[in-house]
Amino acid sequence: MAAAYGAARRRRQALWFWVFTGPFVLGLALFTYVPLAWSVWLGFFDAHNTVSPTDFTGLDNYREVLGDPAFRSALGTFVLFTAFIVPATYVLSLGLALAVGRLRAAQAFFRSVFFLPTACSYVVAALVWKLSVFNGVRFGLANTVLGWFGAEPVAWLSATDPPWYWLVVVTVRLWLQAGFYMVLFLAGLQRIPPQLYEAAAVDGARPGWQTFRHITFPALRATSVAVVLLLVINAFQAFDEFYNLLSDARGYPPYARPPLVYLYYTALGQGQNLGLGSAGAVVLALVIAVVSVVQVRWFGLGRREA
Amino acid sequence: MPISRRLLLAGGAGIALTGCGSNTGRGGEGSGRPRLSHWYHQYGEAGTRQAVGRYAAAYDKAGVRVEWRPGNYDQQTAAALLTDSGPDVFEVNGPTLDQIRGGQVVDLTGLLEGVKGDFNRAVLAPKTWDGRVWGIPQAIDTQLLYYRRSLLEKAGVRPPRTLDELVDAAGRLTAGPVKGLFLGNDGGAGVLGGTPLYAAGLSLVTDDGKPGFDDPTAARTLGKLHRLYAGKSLLLGAPADWSDPAALIQGLTAMQWSGLWALPQVKKALGDDFGVLPFPSDGPAGKPAVPVGAYAAAVSARSGRREEAKAYVKWLWVERTDHQEDFALSYGFHIPARTSLAAKAAKLKEGAAAEIVGFTNDYGYAQPLLWTVAAQTAYQDALSRIIKEGADPEREVKAAVRRTAEELRRAGKKS
């Protein structure tokens, strides 16, 4: 009697488990795993303008995409972008958090002000940067400021020597995301027990750099790891600001072309080379997987504290 | 059985889930006339959208729903053609070779019976593959060089007739904040495309399907474009790109490469203070060049009503010459694809418009169908590096030729 009751209960629990998770599992399978597997399959075919190709070509697409200097330079662009944006955002958002955290008055106000850009869309921000802040003519904001000092207008997005476009690309993302990471750091700062600072002061640590170097920074380790991981993942996904800043009706310049933009033009534009695009996507996914694993190992994310 | 709250919730969720997916947007099966959907890209000129709606409403053999699609139209149609929920009829800046060979568009040769000779040959050629026609040209567009007469006179520069004169003129017209020439914010690689090659007597793809710029002349001509950039006489980073005549009208530049569509705006803003030129020739074998092209009406092979769709396309883009003329000339400014209509149109008979029609007849070239997107990307990348980075033209051209040859081999393999 008790056993029958237990079995019925387990059945009921299983039923409810599927009622609640079923739709999400189904969605995940349908919209993530099926396209993923399909993409891997497409990578082995000559799939121009079709998602049900018949012309098996083995590893040709992989050979072609890895041999394409444009794809290799896209990977280089991504590395360069990450090298700029990750440290820049880290330093800026930590600095903002330290400054805002010390405020005695109007802290909530400044927190909101710096956080606000996070609510802006990448597309809108990119257009504002392109059309008004960094346009190339004399009445652009940046060029107006340069004009006060008697400098010539700079064509920010069109100039390749020096590559001013990096300034535009990096600053737009910096403006958009620094406030968000500032909030993460603020939360981290507030979790540091005040006794640590008191003990340090008693031991003779000077406030300022010494305290930051030996107390604040080490205590923020967990937050820092999370922030760096998120920043790198976000940098991998870079598409919106690059595409909206640099593309035009006739295509995309051969510089500052991150992998997703390259794949977009290969597979989704009029090119419609879905086989080659899929091969590129698989290569990119492998790169991301390797980098993530290395990062997790390096930082020991998820490892239990000893 | 008592109904528990949880059961009710589950039932509700079930109903909500089945509720999705029943509306496919293809209703109206039982309402007598067949339904067709017809896609257009977003035209910038006021009134075009209403006009195409009027034409569609005037067709009595089918109910035509016009879809006006802003944004990346080429990408949207390319993706929609892979599914069953795409358009029946759509306009396309093509169709591309891969679309034709992939069986995505329907053979429309029969629609042109008896009137094929009346369509502009240059723009019909890229719509033709294997002797069959895959899209009906709607209206011809072209691009050309606009210049401010007064600025040229002030600088003592005569309208450039050769590429060297153009480079020289752009330099002399650059004064302070006013630049000599505007070829687009990317420095010209995008919009010029193959035009300088044709101006040097070369081509993108030869008639027998070989790369048309495997020649030392190509590197020499394209190399001259770098002088424009290096001499700081190109306008870069303008708020509105080359397709909009704003830079010329606002006095940011003395000369601008733009489209025929800009003519009414330029005329209205500048009156007589402007002139038009084709892209100037270069070298002894060269002659001036202007690109011509046409959006075409095509029928999707995945449409369930292909015959009805073909009949509708024939009605609108072959038979109704009144609609065609209205479409080409009443809103924006295009040349009708039918030569008989273009010859009749009063608006094209005088002034700059007549000159431009002359350019298209004498110097017009259309991008060959065999010029695939991959070849174009390789060429455009090469051109951009030549113009902006001063890369070695010979090496860059050679790389683009190699990629083009590969693409042409792929195209030849399956035909």
Image (cartoon, rainbow, N blue to C red):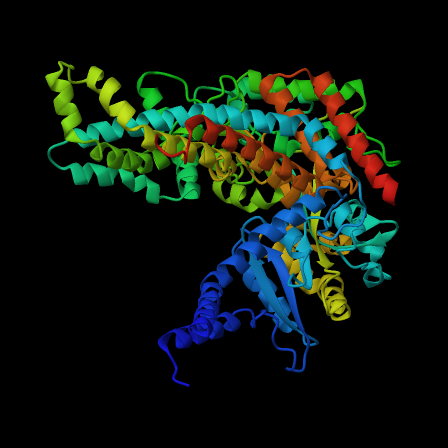
Q: How many marks?
A: 0
Residue A165 in the image, given as x and y percentages of width and height: 47, 26
The front one of A100 and B250 is A100
Asked whether residue A175 appears in the rendered view, the answer is yes
Asked whether residue A269 appears in the rendered view, the answer is no
Q: Quadrant of the N terminus of chain B?
A: bottom left
Q: With A208 as the anchor, is A134 left or right in this view?
A: right
Residue, x 77% and y 43% (percent of image)?
A46
Residue A110 in the image, given as x and y percentages of width and height: 20, 36
Quadrant in the rendering for residue A126: top left
Q: Quadrant of the C terminus of chain B?
A: top right
Q: With B162 as the anchor, is B176 left or right in this view?
A: left
* Vertical arrangement, residue A191 with respect to residue B94, above or below: above
Quadrant in the rendering for residue A188: top left
Residue B27 in the image, given as x and y percentages of width and height: 60, 75
Residue B98 in the image, given as x and y percentages of width and height: 76, 47
Furthest-bottom residue in this view: B1
The front one of B377 and A117 is A117
Residue, x 60% and y 63% (percent of image)?
B52
The front one of A204 and A100 is A204
* Vertical arrangement, residue A73 with respect to residue A26, above or below: above
The front one of A187 and B97 is A187
Residue, x 18% and y 31% (percent of image)?
A193
* Vertical arrangement, residue B135 with respect to residue B195, above or below: below
